[in-house]
Image: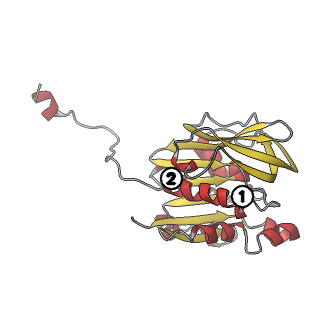
Amino acid sequence: MNTIQVTVWNEYRHEKQNPLVQQIYPEGIHQAIAGYLREDEHLEVRTAVLDDHDHGLTDEVLDNTDVLFWWGHMAHGEVQDEIVEKVRQKVLNGMGLIVLHSGHGAKIFTELLGTNTQALKWRDDGEKEKLWVVEPGHLIVSGLGDYIELEKEEMYGERFEIPAPDELVFISWFEGGEVFRSGCCYRRGTGKIFYFRPGHETFPTYHQPEIIQVLRNAVYWAAPTEGADVTYGRTAPDREHQESH
């Protein structure tokens, strides 16, 4: 099996400003996720953060990334539009993108989906969440049971202003009664996108084995695959096909 090149991107602001978040993720959410993914010998994992040069997403990094994770929240507006466009083009050309939790408001997610993806209900009271598997044959849920239970998480509730997913693999239920489309798959160009809702910074969600299993599975689902060559623009008729008839 070929090695999959993974970049875990995080704005890395809450961990520097909130002692509780720092206690849960002392080296940052990005390093926690990267550390767990590195346990898979088939994944080569690097990290990048907002305050790096070019947000850590240089041409060299993007050219050597098969799957990009994106976690952002309080600094979506600080992400340079030029970098967003570079990432968008990479996705359209086959790079996988996994958008986590509050990354629903990231410029790159909005650009690729074409709607106001920040429109939803929320409540950060630390309620129990059940992530129900609704597409049990999907690669992303491989190895899971009927649901994943999180003792404390932030509530996101419908209506979530996204296009209907190409594939919906998780629906969340919260103690307050709300539900949410929490595992949404899309294709844009030749790239694949997975939005995965859990991961509020003040809860240890990314230390839960089932969540890491989903993230690992998502890498394999989102990684580029070889397909047919694609051409665009004005083209000549297929004379050989016409003559055979």
Q: What residue type is labelled 1?
A: Gly
In the orientation shown, which residue stands out farthest toward the bottom? 27
Corner quadrant of residue 34: bottom right
Q: Mark 2 points at which residue?
A: 222
Whether residue 18 is visible, yes or no, is no
Give above or below for 90 relative to 235: below
- Percent x, y of residue 72: 71, 58
Question: Which secondary structure lies at badge 1?
Answer: loop
Q: Mark 1 points at which residue?
A: 72
Query: Residue visible at 62% across and 51% down?
Result: 108
Q: What residue type is labelled 2?
A: Ala
Mark nearer the viewer, 1 or 2: 2
Query: Residue visible at 76% across and 37% down?
Result: 179
Give above or below for 179 relative to 230: above
- The N terminus lies in quadrant: bottom left
- Percent x, y of residue 175: 84, 41
Instruction: Say whether residue 47 is left or right of residue 187.
Output: right
Q: Nearer the viewer, residue 94 or 202?
A: 202
Q: Nearer the viewer, residue 136 or 87?
A: 136
- Percent x, y of residue 45: 55, 70
Instruction: Say whether residue 125 is left or right of residue 153.
Output: right
- Dot 1: within a 10 Å radius of its alpha carbon, few (fewer than 14), some, or many (20 or more) residues? many
- Percent x, y of residue 80: 65, 59
Task: State the mark number for residue 237.
Answer: none
Q: How far apart are marks 1 and 2 (CA)?
A: 20 Å
Instruction: Say whether residue 203 is left or right of residue 61.
Output: right
Whether residue 32 is visible, yes or no, is yes
Q: Which of 230 and 39 is in front in this view?
A: 39
In the orientation shown, which residue stands out farthest toward the front? 145
Query: Residue visible at 76% across and 59% down?
Result: 75
- The C terminus lies in quadrant: top left
Q: Nearer the viewer, residue 148 or 16?
A: 148
